[in-house]
Image (cartoon, rainbow, N blue to C red):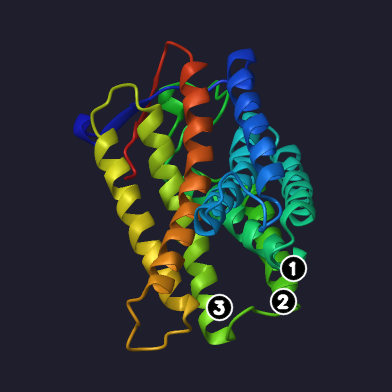
Amino acid sequence: MEAGKQQTYLIPLFNRRALLILGGWALAMIVASWRTADPADGFTENHEMNFALRCFVIGGWLGSIAASCWITSAVKQPAVRYGLQVALVLIGVTLFWFTFSDDPWLSTLVDMVGIVLSQNVVFAWIAVPRWNDPRESSQRRPHQFSIGDLIAMTTAFALLLTSARDLLPPIRAELYWPVLIGIWLTIPVATALLSQAILLATPRGGLARVILVGIVVALGSFAMAVFATELEFPIEWNDLFFLYVLYYMMVFIGFLATFAMTSFAGRISAKQVAVTESAGL
């Protein structure tokens, strides 16, 4: 393997230092959720600003579910790890639904199951560092899946398709499903790039990943705004359209902010000895 195709990452550890940082972020999100749960309430007297902040909190909440599933990578046994992920998704989606009630519970569940399932695949495929990973660098390679991983992901995908059959799309089905699949694919890629950038042992290569994530967020927000108008062309470049762009962008930023904080906690708590991975991206 060529040295130029390798990247060195720190091993994130779930210890007291990481727990302190993540607990502080969780407390901030709880307070923000309490202040923004009611769309008529907020931090300011500006309705548009309050809704944008609410979108950030919604993204942060959903990002917390996905980030907590990443932290379960510290568990060695696949059955226990995926069992924890199922519990975290169910509890997180239920609490989210009780707090915001914007979308049906099943709709949010399908969204998050797809994101977490895709995240498991993407993170393993491009070798995003696992929490508390004890393996030496010679044992760590991208694109590795155990038999347990494959069985669990196949089962989860089958359950996802079964649940999706009972889902009533909020917009036309021919628009909803391509958008949802796009979200399942792009969000885990963006969070993987951001997590890798923060966990790099040296800054080289990190800035390029962050810029790429920014491009994904900008393009994704624009695309979501277009689909929110149900592809009515020509697009009216008015204040409402750009508010859609802003709101979707705040959801993405909130989601990624939680992963950034999680990765930062992992970096602060990491072992001084780094591991070398093949650079997937």
Q: Nearer the viewer, mark 3 or mark 1?
A: 1
Where does label 3 land, which residue? 176
- Does residue 90 sit above or below 21 in this rendering? below
As drawn, the label of residue 167 is: 2
- Residue 208 lies in what quarter of the image? top left
Q: Which amino acid type corresponds to the residue marked 3 in the rendered image? A: Tyr
Distance between mark 3 and mark 1 Cα atoms:
15 Å
Where does label 1 land, which residue? 104
Q: Which amino acid type corresponds to the residue marked 2 in the rendered image? A: Leu
Q: Are marks 1 and 2 in contact (CB under 8 Å)?
A: yes
Instruction: Classify mark 3: helix, strand or loop.
Output: helix
Circle 2 crowding by C-alpha within 10 Å: few under 14, some 14–19, many from 20: few
- Does residue 129 sit above or below 91 in this rendering? above
Q: Which amino acid type corresponds to the residue marked 1 in the rendered image? A: Pro
Q: Nearer the viewer, residue 160 or 112?
A: 112
Circle 1 crowding by C-alpha within 10 Å: few under 14, some 14–19, many from 20: few
> Mark 2 or mark 1, which is nearer the start of the sequence?
1
- Residue 47 lies in what quarter of the image? bottom right
Q: Is residue 16 left or right of residue 228?
A: right
Q: Is residue 110 left or right of residue 233?
A: right
Q: Where does the image place residue 156, in percent across and percent down from the top left?
A: 69, 59
